[in-house]
């Protein structure tokens, strides 16, 4: 069945209100479009856990810290809607920028601490933009559950924190990263890679998984990180922005594998910035 398209918050709220009155549970997947199998995994999780599924497509201008990055962000609305039809979505919400940010819009949501460091250190204002738009979307759609990818691990933790702090009545679900067969995490930004850069890009997850194995086997963290940094540059990346072992819970820096952790990195291949992260758990010894 063709999903309903909504362009205003009133249209979304009308649909959701009717479903809820009929006793249906609502799952919600916010996206910026240029959809791929990673997004589809979120939709599948939402389908499996709810009676109705809403997906939003909104390229949020306030989370881009450079005008050229926003202009270069891939857009494919018609193809995205076809893909969502095939995935069995009930409603696609496609707000225009002035629907989200009408004249006079003046409020921002800032999640202190967890937004600092990692991507927050290199993209000033990014998480304020993300936190603000996700808060608005969660309040507009009012779902029972909302689904976010572990691919953007810091973003997932920022959203879990704001939902808890602001008492937003929604359950936030994290979904494991979907990867290509060579390990590259699916990302809308991969569309911007040349064939050569696409080959290089696989060096990022390769280095992360290798370092995670070494740390899991007891290697010293600084040495394992240094080796991984070299491996990423040797693969052909032009710059490693950050490469860090952090607590999976608090995102505090870790000197050793003393608690469930995440190894997170951002690196540039040509003009494309890629991020990735892998989980590590302390071994019973
Ligand atoms: P985006 O459209 O890039 O803003 O992503 C929308 C949602 O899809 C976010 O929750 C992302 O974390 C998630 N996502 C993006 N890529 C992947 C992936 N490869 N695997 C799982 N989830 C992903």
Image (cartoon, rainbow, N blue to C red):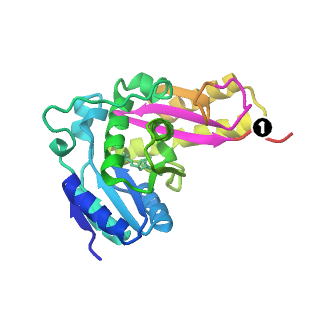
Is 9 colored magenta in this rendering?
Answer: no
* Residue 81 percent across, percent down from the top left: 27, 63
Q: Main secondary structure of the magenta part?
A: strand
Of residues 91 and 232, which is closer to you in this image? 91
Above-or-below relation of 186 to 259: below
Q: Residue at x 37, y 65 (%)?
A: 20
The boundaries of the magenta stretch are 254-280
Above-or-below relation of 187 to 113: below
Q: Is residue 200 left or right of residue 34?
A: right
* Residue 19 percent across, percent down from the top left: 34, 68
Of residues 34 and 159, which is closer to you in this image? 159
Above-or-below relation of 281 to 92: above
* Residue 37 percent across, percent down from the top left: 43, 59
The residue where tag 1 is placed is 217
* Residue 285 percent across, percent down from the top left: 86, 39
Q: Residue furthest front?
A: 21
């Amino acid at each position: 069945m063709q999903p309903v398209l909504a362009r205003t918050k009133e249209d979304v709220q009308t649909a959701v209100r009717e479903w809820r009155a009929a006793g249906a549970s609502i799952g919600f997947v916010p996206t910026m479009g240029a959809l791929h199998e990673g997004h589809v995994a979120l939709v599948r999780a939402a389908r499996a856990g709810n009676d109705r599924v809403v997906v939003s497509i909104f390229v949020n201008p306030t989370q881009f810290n450079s005008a050229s990055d926003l202009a270069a962000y891939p857009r494919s609305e018609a193809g995205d809607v076809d893909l969502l039809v095939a995935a069995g979505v009930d409603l696609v919400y496609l707000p225009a920028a002035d629907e989200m940010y009408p004249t006079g819009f003046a409020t921002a949501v800032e999640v202190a601490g967890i937004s600092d460091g990692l991507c927050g250190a290199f993209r000033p204002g990014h998480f304020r933009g993300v936190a603000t738009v996700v808060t608005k979307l969660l309040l507009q759609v009012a779902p029972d559950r909302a689904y976010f990818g572990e691919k953007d691990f810091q973003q997932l933790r920022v959203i879990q924190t704001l939902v808890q702090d602001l008492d937003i009545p929604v359950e936030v679900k994290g979904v494991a990263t979907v990867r290509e067969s060579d390990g590259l995490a699916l990302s809308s930004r991969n569309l911007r890679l040349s064939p050569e850069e696409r080959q290089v890009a696989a060096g990022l997850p390769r280095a992360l998984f290798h370092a995670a194995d070494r740390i899991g086997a007891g290697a010293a963290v600084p040495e394992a990180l240094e080796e991984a940094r070299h491996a990423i540059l040797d693969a052909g990346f032009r710059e490693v922005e950050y490469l860090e072992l952090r607590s999976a819970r608090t995102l505090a820096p870790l000197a050793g594998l003393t608690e469930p952790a995440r190894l997170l990195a951002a690196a540039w291949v040509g003009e494309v910035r890629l991020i990735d992260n892998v989980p590590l758990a302390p071994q019973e010894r």
